[in-house]
Image (cartoon, rainbow, N blue to C red):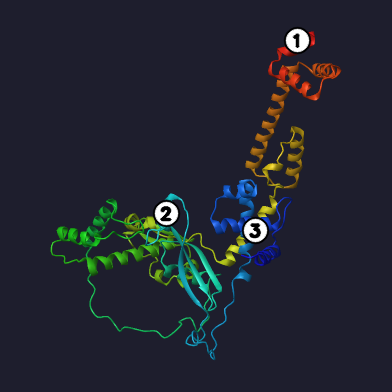
Amino acid sequence: MDRRTFDLLCELLRSRGLKATGSLAVEEQVCMFLHTLSHHVKNRTIGSRFFRFGETVSRYFNSVLNRVIRLHDVLLRVPDPVPENCTDERWKWFKNCLGALAGTYIRVRVLENDKPRYRTRKGEIATNVLGVCSRDMKFIFVMPEWEGFASDSRVLRDTLNKPTGLKVLTGIESGGPSHTTGNKTGSRRAWTKDEEEAMLNILDTVVANGGRADNGTLKSGSYKYIENELEKLLLGSGLKAYPHIDSKIRIWKKSYGVIFDMLNTSGFGWNEVRKCVVVDSDEVWRSYVESHKDASNRRDKSFSYYERLANIFGKDRATGSSTETPNDMANAALQEEIHDDDNEIDDEGSPMSTTLPSNSQYTTQSRSQSSNRRRSKLDEQIAGGIDKLVSAFHQANADMSQNMFGSSEDHDYIGRELASMGLSVDDELIALNLMVEKPSHIKAFKVL
């Protein structure tokens, strides 16, 4: 980034409310933010480079980030469709095309318990981000924060269903003619209750023995193992790894995912007796089914295998609970800014300029701050602890001085006597240092 681009970015952020403080200019705040992102360094490294406290770096990083999010209306472009009379050899074949979308994985660091949900098919810990670009490679829409375990189709479906999500103009959403391969012929094999129970028992054993990979799929050879075990338990069943076992696992996984998503939505619950999903009202059900067609036949329909499938599929199920569209993130950033303004604390932010206030100064400052802003219970506890610490420090100083010199009269006496001797400043300091190191010298000095 050159200097001109940096200045333009700072001006844009000022227009979104980023302000300089007593010790940090807007340019320094933005510089710390960009340095963190571009070099992927830790908070401590930035604090050492810019001579700032770690808390100061963290606070201003989030402040700049909130303003950058609020620039989505400037940074995200409104697309123009490819016109009918387009002569560009690359785009004239895509009439009315607005752009292209694709998913990409961005590596992240998450808690150990959350890693299975963020593990991709290749074993990386990442988040699945949906990006939409215009034909000149300008971003139109971004949907971050989906777990890496989630498929691209699920991320896209959620993005289209969100109230502030991606909207596709009517009449051009297909993007081209559809193609069909004709009707498939053949009959599906019906599984018996005993076959399904045997299959679930074998799957439990496979998962318990580590047969499930980190990305949530069964390890190589698991289907063949299940086929052999079913043949031992059910002689002559004829169940094969492909297509029977593979198809059954796909159906179960899809059914489990549909019910899991419903139970993680407000207004839905699970009936332990009937083993089915229940809903609070018809209005909640109609609203949900409009955006989740796969759940249309799941209301009050028994699915007795849900708890058992939770042990097989549940731990790696992506939820997408933290996903937000650019509009949602901008609104959340604005609310956070309002909250921070209500609880703003004046801080110079530099360890070089920090001084310890006296007990009386601290008490006065605490009273004035408490009258101007709301303080949480934790803040009050911290303030009380610092107050006690300062009081103890001053008391210890007074006790040490009393033990060394006795009283204030001794201070004056020793000072007058040293001044009357005509000693140099260095000699006076040496004499005082000897008295501090060995208090018995004070009594000898008085006798002399």
* Residue bearing mark 2: 115
Which residue lies at the image location 72% right of the left edge and 53% below the top edge? Answer: 21
Local secondary structure at mark 1? helix
User: Would residue 331 be visible to someone looking at this image?
Assistant: yes
Report, in whole angstroms, how far the alpha carbon at label 1 lies from the one at label 2: 73 Å
**Image: 349 above or below 234:** above
Q: Nearer the viewer, residue 96 or 91?
A: 91
| Residue where numbered disc 3 is placed | 30
Q: Is the Cβ of the residue at disc 3 closer than 8 Å to that at disc 2?
A: no
* x 51%, y 59%: residue: 322
Sequence-earlier tag: 3 or 1? 3
10 Å crowding of disc 3: few (<14), some (14-19), many (20+): many
Vertical position of residue 126 compared to residue 189: above or below: above
Foreground: 93 or 90? 90
Q: Mark 2 or mark 3, which is nearer the start of the sequence?
A: 3
Check disc 2 and give the amino acid type.
Answer: Lys
